[in-house]
Amino acid sequence: MTPGEQPNRPDTHFGLIPPGGQAETTTYTSTRRRMVWAAFLVVVILGVAVVIVLPKLVAAPESAATAMQTDATTLSVQTALPPIPVQDASAVRGTAEMALQDFLQTRARLELANAPMWGEPEWSLALNSAEKGNRLFGQRQFAMAMVSYTGAQNILLSLESESRLRLDRALVSAQQSLEGNDSGSATGFFEIALAIDPHSEIAGNGLQRARVRPEVLQLMATGNQAVSLNKLSVARSAYHEAVALDKAYGPASAALQQVSEQINELAFQDAMSRAMGALEANQVGIAEQALRQASALKPREQVVGDVQKQMESLRQDLWLADHRRQAAGREHAEDWPGAVDIYRTVLAAVPQAAFAKQGLEFAQDRARLHRQLDHFLDEPTRIYSEQPLANAEILLESAGMPPLEETLLADKIHRLQSLITEAQTPLTVTLQSDGMTSVLIYHVGRLGQFTRHQLELRPGTYTAIGSRAGYRDVRQTFSVRPGVDLPALDIRCEESV
């Protein structure tokens, strides 16, 4: 195959075709002299190419004018070079073929690295230089073809060495475009960066952000318009969607935070207003619920703590007032033990409650007085004895006159007074005997012998003993009770011994 012929290989898309291995019709006889001469000519040609042409190719021309200058220089060199003898052309051709192979390998490597996407214009310059080398090779200008191939190779090597720098530049340009909301340019730059480094997280994330930027901007516009119309909930929803699409987009996060703070402030003010209104109406439950809402919105707000203290003070006042009413109800019902329990409960919670201290002392005194009265009233016969009667009289004197509203106490005092009066009022007791039995009543005295005898005895229980010489003594216990008629007692000794 001769240079310029289209080979059956994938790189024909770029118009780069390696020279064929067409058999030469001339048979070369290798002699020492000819080999020395051929080597000398190759050295001369390469020297001229290196000095004149190669530096311009390595410089990677960046414009059409530079490329044209390179072509002109190459042409002048080609014109200036003397014809190469046929016997020496084989060595130069081999060198050109080696240069072409180096270029093709480098090109294949860079194609795998996506250089056609990120390597312009150097990539096209390298392919054009290689294509020129193909034409020269086909014209059997092997030295100049080798220069073109070498220039193309150097361009690609330089491009390969700059991949990291180009990646950094692409990322910087992409970020600048994204910050300027130029999503199209940012997308292109991020795609270039990903072509250079497919594993770049910065480029991958940036490309995603660039693609959704138009939608984010539309959501921002919707949110801004809603704010202007005081539709804060709508604005917050729009900003929230924008942040969900691009968490790194600062304006969306700032707008979301600002509108959220406005909504929270309005909700906070509403909760505090409801709390204060409830406190004024003594509605502690409603105030507590509103304060919980306000505290959830602004946990560290001083005013919340102040109102909470007011609420706790009101709660305590209401609680004390309620227990005070309960105690007053017990006192009105003269349920003094119940009143004592309430006052003790109050003092356990609020030791400084003055009404409970005073009320407890009074209720305890009244409860004790009722217990003492009940001690006699529950068993009236207690006062029929001298000492209990004296104690009842002392108790009655200390009780004094009860208030009009304490009807239960007044009734008990009146009943005790009646019991004392009855206990102090003697009743007539009639005794009968046989005139021969001596009668004695303990704690009263000897009555002697009689057939009928009456005496005055205060209510109580008495024991009468009858005795007679030669007869067994008799004993009889009887009780004297107010309002109870006692039949005549017969006391006589009739059983002889």
Image: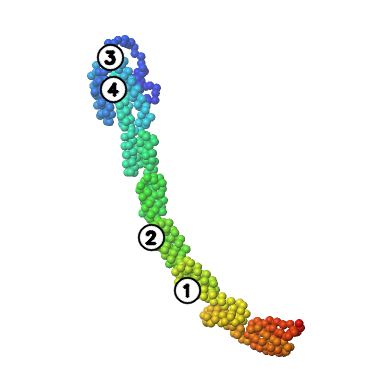
User: Is the residue marked by circle 3 packed among few (<14), some (14-19), or many (20+) residues within 10 Å?
Assistant: many
Kindly identify which residue carries mark 1: 358
Q: Of helix, strand and loop, which one carries label 2?
A: helix
Amino acid type indicated by mark 2: Gln
Quarter holding residue 440:
bottom right
Q: Which mark is residue 302?
A: 2
Say above or below: 79 vs 318: above
Instruction: Give the mark nearest the N terminus, 3 or 2.
Output: 3
- The x, y position of residue 237, in whole percent, is 41, 51
Quadrant where the C terminus sits is bottom right
Q: Is residue 423 left or right of residue 119?
A: right
Residue depicted at x 33% and y 41%: 175
Labels 3 and 4: the sequence-earlier one: 3
Q: Nearer the viewer, residue 312 or 437?
A: 437
How packed mark 1 is, by other alpha carbons closer than 10 Å (few <14, some 14-19, many 20 or more), is: few
Would you say the residues marked 3 and 2 are in contact, meaning their CB atoms lie under 8 Å apart?
no
Secondary structure at badge 3 equals helix
If the image is split into quadrants, where does the N terminus sit?
Answer: top left
**Marks 4 and 2, the one that precedes in the sequence:** 4
Residue carrying label 3: 38
Image location (x, y in percent) of residue 95: 31, 19
Residue carrying label 4: 147
Labels 3 and 4 touching (C-beta < 8 A)? no
Colour basis: rainbow
